[in-house]
Image (spheres, grey):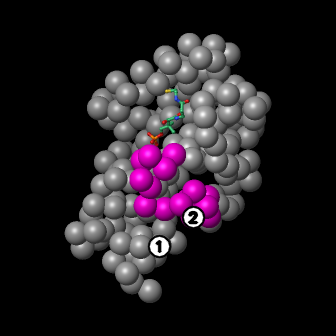
Amino acid sequence: MVAIYPGSFDPITTGHLDLIQRASVLFDKLIVAILRNDEKKPLFSVQERIEMLQESVTGIANVEVASFDGLLVSYAAECGASVIVRGIRAISDYEYELQMALMNRRLGPDIETVFLMAGEAHSFISSRLVKEVIRLGGNIRGLVPPSVEVRLKERLLGEH
Ligand code: PNS
């Protein structure tokens, strides 16, 4: 069974990585798919986000990294994926996720959305907060993979 884990991943956090590890055990193949959407004004280009994801998932044999635009259900069908994986950290995620899952079910009734709970150690991590903390000089060690921390410091603090 092929599953797709879509998101912005701007950038990937250890919370995302935890979810990728959990999902990779459940499915034969997991496609981590980055949405190409410049309207969200991403900090990292799609190519950079692909690289960071690839660096972080080496060692998990059944995970592939890709990008997509347009409707998620169309891309999932193109990939032969029958499952969409999303992570839920807290109740606050639920409403948005429910809305997307039901819209995706309407658009692609054959594709099921499966929610996985992030490990409690990761449940407060978000790409947005990680960027805010680093911008303000806080320590983000352990919240993103080490290579991502390096890129974030380069991009936001001008460190080389
Ligand atoms: O990490 P994010 O930003 O919460 O991920 C959101 C994402 C990429 C899963 C969502 O925006 C998406 O699937 N966009 C593709 C467009 C689409 O299919 N929209 C209609 C269904 S809700």
Camera-nearest residue between 114 and 133: 133
Residue at left offset 50%, top offset 18% = 103
Question: x, y percentage for residue 86?
Answer: 51, 34
Q: In the rendered structure, does residue 40 fall within the stretch colored magenta?
A: yes
Residue at left offset 57%, top offset 57% = 46
Question: x, y percentage for residue 80?
Answer: 77, 30
Front tag of 2 and 1: 2
The quadrant the N terminus occupies is top right
Sequence-first tag of 2 and 1: 2
Q: Are marks 2 and 1 in contact (CB under 8 Å)?
A: yes
Look at mark 2 in the image and give the residue it sits on.
48
Query: Could you tell me if residue 52 is visible in this image?
Result: no
Q: Is residue 119 above or below residue 140?
A: above
Amino acid on which the number 2 mark rests in the picture: Glu
Query: Could you tell me if residue 124 is visible in this image?
Result: yes
The quadrant the C terminus occupies is bottom left
Q: Neighbour class for label 1 at 10 Å: few (<14), some, many (≥20)? A: some
What element does badge 2 sit on?
helix
Question: x, y percentage for residue 84?
Answer: 60, 30
Amino acid on which the number 1 mark rests in the picture: Arg
- Point out the stretch of residues depicted in magenta: 37-52
Q: Which mark is residue 151?
A: 1
Please tell me in which quadrant of the rendered image residue 57 appears.
bottom right
Q: In the rendered structure, does residue 48 fall within the stretch colored magenta?
A: yes
Q: Is residue 4 above or below residue 124?
A: above
Residue at left offset 35%, top offset 45% = 123
